[in-house]
Amino acid sequence: MTDLREISFADVDLDVLTEAEGVVAILIAPDGTLSPAARRLNRLTKGAVARALDSEAWSDLAEADTMTLSWPTGLAAGHLVLVKLPRRPQALEARKAGAAIAKAAGPKSALVLVENTTRPEELALGLALKGYAFTARKSAPKDTPGAAVIMAKNAEAAAEAHAGLRAIAEGVAFTRDLVSEPANVLTTTEFADRLVALEALGVEVEVLEEDRLAELGMGALLCVGQGSASPSKVVVMRWKGAEGAPLALVGKGVVFDTGGISLKPAAGMEDMTMDMGGAGVVSGVMKAVAGAKIPAHVVGLVGLVENMPSGTATRPGDIVTSMKGDTIEVINTDAEGRLVLADVLWHAQQSEKPSGVIDLATLTGACIIALGHDNAAVFSNDDGFAQSFLKAATAEGEGAWRLPLGQSYDDLLKSQKADMKNVGGRAAGSITAAQFLQRFIEPDMPWIHLDIAGVAQMTKESALGPKGATGWGVMALTRMIRDNYTKQSEG
């Protein structure tokens, strides 16, 4: 796994400022009031800090953004970074400030003077997430970013508060790594092996191989991978931090999607290494929940397949039988993710008896047309369940927007030859995909479907991450679990 920047907390010691190397960063209130550390830095730099704060550039600077003074007089550090931040920032503001420091520091070590500003643990989370870079496949990988020391008024309390957030950051990094890996490395077998390694954190991991999937009757999932040399698998991860029925998370794990016989255009097909993004998020949440030892009962299930064209591949017009027993006419083999999820969703409900189910998938291009890259699409049969997720997503700054379900959309899936078709046409494509999945949800089972096609991977950097895999959803789902499914939240 990609190593995140090492971050530690220390009490404020202004005597080390002259000797600190790399980058020194100081938080300054928007009104320019100088803290004791800022006054010391201003003296050491012969008034450079005060001159910067009197400039129009500082006035125009957005909150949580930075101004960098290079090669400052009186300091060993190559850069002095001034961070515009209120003394009592919101959590998301503090994270953005940490991310801005990480961007300004690059690979260099950093000394960050927080002093009396609140939420130093949130700043550290942004510092860790923004410093992520996937370099595992480079011949000369980039070195791990230099360590950061955060000086705060109560360093011990800040370190304790950050410990749980650090586990979440590592869960996000785990997801980003999985989504970033090429398909010749992250085969279905390699993916399963990486999940088995979560046993070191106390997660119980079970790998269901093809023969077992056939015994269970997972004809929908198996038809997707039958054209590939890579074996299809289902991996079940159980974190039993509390008693009672678990929350089930289900992820689509298509490690590469050619579209099968309904072959995708060549342009952009290289991005289909990220079609296991849903399974990647489920995996990252399980790592975060276990790493933070959250007292909740959570089970994650991922269907791992590869969708390839070959002499054994499923053809358009084939009819397959799902684990539920429903027959499905495969109109388009590129609508394969819903076939995988159908069987895993049914298995999750039958084997784990959950209190609710959330599935995630990079499912439809139609979702990107509807919502772009700012929001995932949210579908649900339960208003309260959906609202609990949307509240968590808003708190974590992860965009999500609810879209409708309805019988008229479901009717588009009718087939003359089978119980249903796997597509409903171009109109409302993300909604008909959700309607397909809802057919595999038991009556009265609270369910959310998250279509993350537009948010799993970005072509430009985000506030807390670089260009590429985002890890969207790990923070929101972990917060939802912590706020609604722990022993404390139930008590």
Image (cartoon, rainbow, N blue to C red):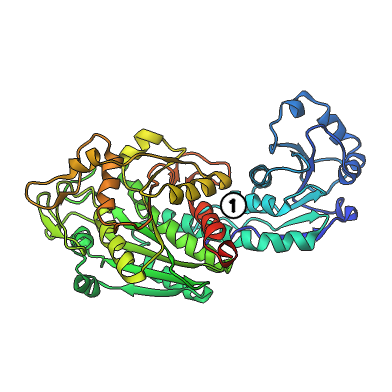
- 174 or 21, which is in the foreground? 174
Residue 58: image quadrant is top right
Does residue 224 show up? yes
Residue 411, above or below 417:
above
How packed mark 1 is, by other alpha carbons closer than 10 Å (few <14, some 14-19, many 20 or more), is: many
- 344 or 174, which is in the foreground? 344
- At numbered mark 1, what does the secondary structure look like: helix, strand or loop? helix
183 to the left or right of 120: left
- 284 or 71, which is in the foreground? 284
- 463 or 213, which is in the foreground? 213
426 to the left or right of 165: left
182 to the left or right of 163: left
For label 1, the residue is 129
- Looking at the picture, how far across and down is residue 251, in whole percent? 37, 58
Does residue 141 show up? no
- Looking at the picture, how far across and down is residue 117, in whole percent? 79, 47
- Looking at the picture, how far across and down is residue 205, in whole percent? 41, 74
Residue 165: image quadrant is bottom right
Furthest residue toward left? 417
Check the picture and name the quadrant holding the C terminus: bottom right
Q: Amino acid type of disc 1?
A: Leu
Furthest residue toward top? 56
Q: Residue at x 70, y 35 (%)?
A: 63
Q: Residue at x 43, y 59 (%)?
A: 282
